[in-house]
Amino acid sequence: GWHMDSLEKKGMNSSLLNNRKIFYALLILVFIIGSFLTWKTQTNAIETQKQETIMLAKSASSLIPKSYLLTLTASELDLEKEEYKIIKQNLIRFVENNELIHFAYIFMLKDDDIYFAVDSEPENSSDYSPPGEIYYEAEEWDYIPFIQKIPTVSEPFEDSWGKWVSVLVPITDYENNEILGVFGLDYPVSTWYMNTLRNTIQVGIMTLCVLAIIIVLQMIISMNFELKKEKQLIFETDNRLRDSMALYKAVFDQTTIGIAIADNFKYLVETQTGIPSINPAFEKILGRPKEQIADVTWSEITNPNDLGVDLEYFKQFKAGIIEGYEMDKRYIRPDGKEVWVHMIISPLHFENPHNKYHLCIIEDITSRKIIEKNLKESENSKSILLDNLPGMIYRCKFDKDWTMLFTSQGCKELTGYDSDSLINNAEVSYNDIIAPKYRQYIWDKWITVLNNKQKFIYEYEIVTADGQTKWVYEQGQGIYDEFDNVIELEGLIIDISDRKNSEDRIRYVNEHDALSGLYNQKSLVEHFNNDIENEENISKAVIIIHIKRYNLMITAYGYSYCESITLDLVNNLSSLTDETHMLYQLSMDRFALYVKNFKNIKELTQVAEKIVNILSYNVALRSYGAWVGLDIYDKSIPDIHTTLKNATMAANFVKGIEPFGYSIYNTQMEESIRRQEDVKDVIASICNDSKREVFHLVYQPILDSKGNICFFEALARIDDDKLGSVSPSEFIPIAEKRHLIVDLGKIILDEACQFIKLLENNGQKDISVSVNISAIQILRDDFLSDLRDIINKNRIPAHMLILEITESVFAENLEFINSQLAKAQVMGIRSAIDDFGTGYSSLSRERELAADIIKIDKFFIDQILVKDEKELITSDIIHLAHKLGQKTVSEGIETNLQKEYLKRNDCDYYQGFLFSKPLSAKDAISFLKKD
Ligand code: C2E
Ligand code: CA
Ligand code: CA
């Protein structure tokens, strides 16, 4: 309402408004305040617009699945990707739904250049930027979201596509907070300003209105005042008034605000005093010239929809209940089109205090209304978008009920409850819907998330209205006030049951061994680590069962038979399992029994003994063996891996010749492993020739019964600075295990052949050299060809060479080894069975070994010293060999007593410290000469 009465009275009484200075001061003041308000509104409007558009960009960008984005590389490769196509489709749809936005796109930063990853232009559009195209026109602000990780709004700028204001928000990876890309929206500069100018124009217009009204008032008042004296006189004598009149005229004629004086339902074309009462703007807005306006009542040209309100106000106004009123209404122009105006009605006591005139001021707000309408429509399309999302968007209070303030329509489908029953916990709280076991966790998680201003992301189960359990994925965040207090939470919850179900299946496959259905190593690690966390003080141990030489077993029996052996074993081992004894299959040949809550080591070793017992019933495993190792978990270690490693190590340290046995981990094992590593390194450097000098052969003479040297046995030696002298009993098995024996074996054969050459050069043409050959060497197909190459290279006669092969090797590969030896024999190379009597228990099968010489193991030679002659079988071995046409060598003779016995029983050759220790090549030659 307008307080014209009081103003007018004041003016009349004090003539204040008649004072030109004060009038101008007032005008200037109003003008300054108006300009300030206009400026302020404009700044605010731009700020609000920026915030709103950033929010819009953020919410739009949050609908782009991060996982999809992660697959994009901002290169042409993306074109084929399904994820690219989906994101692109989303952007296109988004832009279609938002009239004000012309482009949406995702930038990525590579090597300081900004690339298009996806944009909202269809491929056939001329504005389309394919992924990987560099955005050459990037400005400083385009980098801000990448570098400072904050949204930004650009200055208005021009590029090859037009004039724009860009809104850019970073898309970050929740996990590591890295920038995946930047989501940008381009507003054409024109719409951008149209939007912000809306309010500004309004304020500007209001200011003009006030100015105009002051002027009008001034005029009216002064006219009123002056007319009371002498109208003519005043016009002539009072320049002030004339100026005012001129100003009034100027404003009245030039303002875009429509001003008219009305008498009840009719606008006055002219007042009685001849002052124009309808200004040009008024005519323009109504689309009618003065003359036509005079012909109609305002109620006739008011849109019937607005007329009711207008008339109601007008009635009250006329009755003096209200002093004036303002409203938005539509006038109908002569062409039938509508014009929206903001109308202000105020009383006008003109000339005669009892007249019924009033002032009608109107402002054309049609364009604002259109924008409002568009805005409303885009709001609508946003809510359509929300309602069609697969899931539920929510805003809720941060309380233990998660009191819902808003939920999208997806609520019903997700939870089975209507939005209304959830909002303000009307029927049910969201917390009630969450499956009970997750409630506390979700609360705790939100608290940490909010403290760190992070996003809440979690998968959990809910129970729907009909009692069904569903897996959901929730992603949410806090809304904070300026003091960083959480006001509300908002986010998205979607149904992921389908995915979870298939995940469950995948997890089963992932956690279990495909063959036995036992849990696998991954599960063991998980279960164990879980227990470390939850049952910290309960004793834990791992028992490893390792089937030895499983590969050989597969070669011997075939794959499926081995599988059935394993299954048998699993079957038998399950008799040991319960909640505290759980069996896992780590690989084809390794199992683990996870034992927890045991009282002492004794209880554990009993379990290990039971396992060994079960193993020994498995006949097929006997010739391969299986070892059991155990280690107790040490609390100071963070996870199971060390325990597993130790138990495995212990399994490899099982001693003895029995096929099955167990051992408990101790720290010396580690020492020994470390030394094995060092030894392996030395062997490796011998083989690659970088440390050849630490390796050499020594030669132990082998004599006949008359004491003449007939052979030398070549024995390998390593003398390393760091490791000292390493016995072949130590390094040969390591070389075998680490696949270095083949290379080392060639070095040995080569050096032995050089020694043969040396002997030959020293005139010793009849003395042979025997070389120890590992099973792995002789089992190789290329062994013989390698051997031939070495012999040829050294130009020695093949018959000077004897191959020593340990008896135990024959056990499994009799035929193949026999055939290899037979081929060697064709070349003239002789062979000897080493350590005879230890490995291949049945003497009766000796005939099956295709060897020229038998080396009786030191064990039988030592027996000579401790047993009665009658009980000794040493002589039987010699006689048996002779019957088969084989020569015999006795090893490790240390006393004359042994030598005498052997002589008496016709042993052919003699070797041992009694005669000589192994000698260097040089010493061996001088030994020969001395002899
Ligand atoms: P082996 O083939 O049975 O060699 C005989 C071992 O008995 C040698 O030990 C030798 O020094 C030792 N010896 C000889 N006479 C006596 C004695 O009167 N009393 C005692 N107590 N021991 C005696 P060495 O050199 O330590 O070799 C140990 C084993 O290492 C060998 O047993 C052989 O199996 C293996 N080996 C040595 N050199 C090579 C090689 O070049 N290649 C391969 N594959 N294995 C080798
Ligand atoms: Ca030997
Ligand atoms: Ca031997």
Image: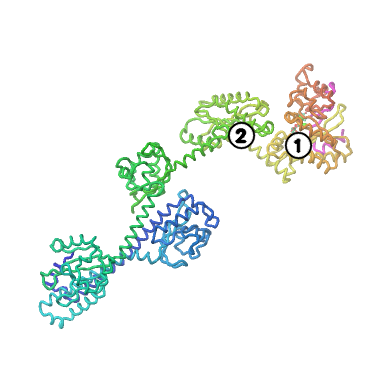
Residue beneath label 1, please?
716
Q: Quadrant of residue 280?
A: bottom left
Which SS class for mark 1? strand
User: Dot 2: few (<14), some (14–19), or many (≥20) neighbours within 10 Å?
Assistant: some
Left or right, residue 928 beside residue 186: right
Which type of secondary structure does the marked residue at label 2 adopt?
loop
Task: Indicate which quadrant contains ligand 2.
Answer: top right
Residue at figure coordinates x 35%, y 51% from the top left: 480
The image's colour scheme reads rainbow
- Indicate yes or no: mark 1 CB to ligand 1 under 8 Å: yes
> In the image, residue 784 lies at what x, y percent?
79, 38
Q: Which residues are magenta?
A: 902-931
Q: Is residue 654 above or below residue 12?
A: above
Q: Residue at x 12, y 80 (%)?
A: 231
Toward the viewer: 168 or 600? 168
Q: Nearer the viewer, mark 2 or mark 1?
A: 2
C-alpha distance separating marks 2 and 1: 36 Å
Work out whether residue 910 or residue 473 is closer to the camera in this orientation and state it. Answer: 473
* Residue highlighted by disc 2: 588
Q: Quadrant of the C terminus?
A: top right
